[in-house]
Image: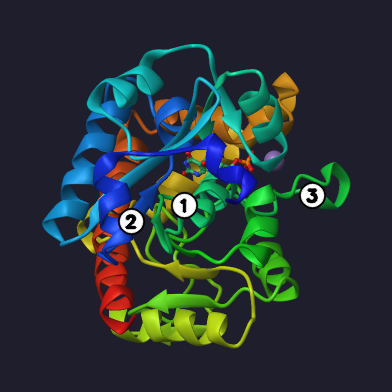
Amino acid sequence: MEKFVKYLELSPEVEAALKEGRPVVALESTIISHGMPYPANVDTARAVEQIVRDHGAVPATIAILNGKLKAGLTDEEIEYLGQATDVIKASRRDIPYIVAQGRNGGTTVGATMIVAALAGIKVFATGGIGGVHRGAETTMDISADLEELGKTDVIVVCAGAKAILDLGLTLEYLETRGVPVLGYQTASLPAFYTSTSEFKVDYRVDSAREIAAIAQTKWDLNLSGGVLVTNPIPAEYSMDPELINQAIENALDEAKVQGIQGKETTPFLLSRIKEITKGKSLDSNIQLVYNNAAVASDIAVELAKAE
Ligand code: PSU
Ligand code: MN
């Protein structure tokens, strides 16, 4: 038996689905513990699970609880992550400490990929990925999400990257790490709150079936690592670019003045942008997560068919 098995705890539903080769979609938990305020975080987490089910897949929300790497949470566990103050934002570097000390962690995109891969889950839906932060040429703030995409075999469905990041440098980094950036029914890189940006994705792909085939081909060829699917926010929830960009600029200025650094940066910016936009950014954030869960489920269904 592989050594990691003793740290892993799959819910009975997730375990059965994986055993039987049925589609499973991983969901992250930093978005619950650090990405959204209570109770919107918990309501969203539950609604996302329902959307995955409605699309014929089994949801596996991933987190670290009492030192166990969990895939598939109970309602009470989701509620706990949404309210507790002892939950650590968990990236790759945090996992050994949290597990060995029996602590709790909300897993980032990168850490969720790690647990998904250990569990045998190939598809993961999130809101936005971390990336190369603006000013990274001096701060060196580059999200570990990008490194993980470079080496861990999971398809990540997101709404692109937020303009709190340097989108151009984020794409450069992904290219260096060999990560295909696919646009779901779009050639433009979506920018999270808005459906387009001035950047192009590597390839536009129009169906879940084609995305599944591209990922399967990548892994058949031993080209290890993730595939990034960027799925634009639906037009009716897309924000006014001027409004959101002004909010982002203001939030970035405040972060600088207050000396916000490291892992606090992304949660700080998300929360400030929400306040500046009077909650509009949170509404958009929730809707794009729903949209990503639906597409990820379709991809998981196609992947399961092909296997
Ligand atoms: N972007 C969002 N909401 C989030 C995050 C990013 O719109 O909740 C979270 C994700 O879990 C992502 C993490 O993996 O922030 C990236 O953090 P950092 O930039 O510190 O790597
Ligand atoms: Mn960072």
Label 3: which residue? 136
| CB under 8 Å between discs 2 and 3 | no
Vertical placement of 252 versus 302: above or below?
above
- Residue plotted at (41% across, 25% down): 275
Label 2: which residue? 25
> At numbered mark 2, what does the secondary structure look like: helix, strand or loop?
strand
In the foreground, 92 or 131? 92
Vertical placement of 102 versus 296: above or below?
above
Q: Residues within 10 Å of mark 1 (few under 14, many from 20)?
A: many
Question: Can the viewer see residue 254 in this picture?
Answer: no
Q: Residues within 10 Å of mark 2 (few under 14, many from 20)?
A: many
* 283 horizontally vs 67: left or right: left
| N-terminal label among 2 and 1 | 2
- Residue plotted at (25% across, 64% down): 22
Q: In the picture, residue 176 is in which quadrant?
A: bottom right
| Mark 1: amino acid | Ala
Percent x, y for residue 287? 26, 48
Disc 1 CB within 8 Å of nearest ligand 1 atom: no
Percent x, y for residue 89? 58, 29
Residue at the outermost left position: 54
> At numbered mark 1, what does the secondary structure look like: helix, strand or loop?
helix
| N-terminal label among 2 and 3 | 2
In the foreground, 146 or 261? 146
Question: Of tags 1 and 3, which is closer to the observer?
Answer: 1
| Mark 3: amino acid | Ala
Number of residue marks: 3
Ligand 1, what quadrant? top right
Label 1: which residue? 119
Quarter containing the C terminus: bottom left
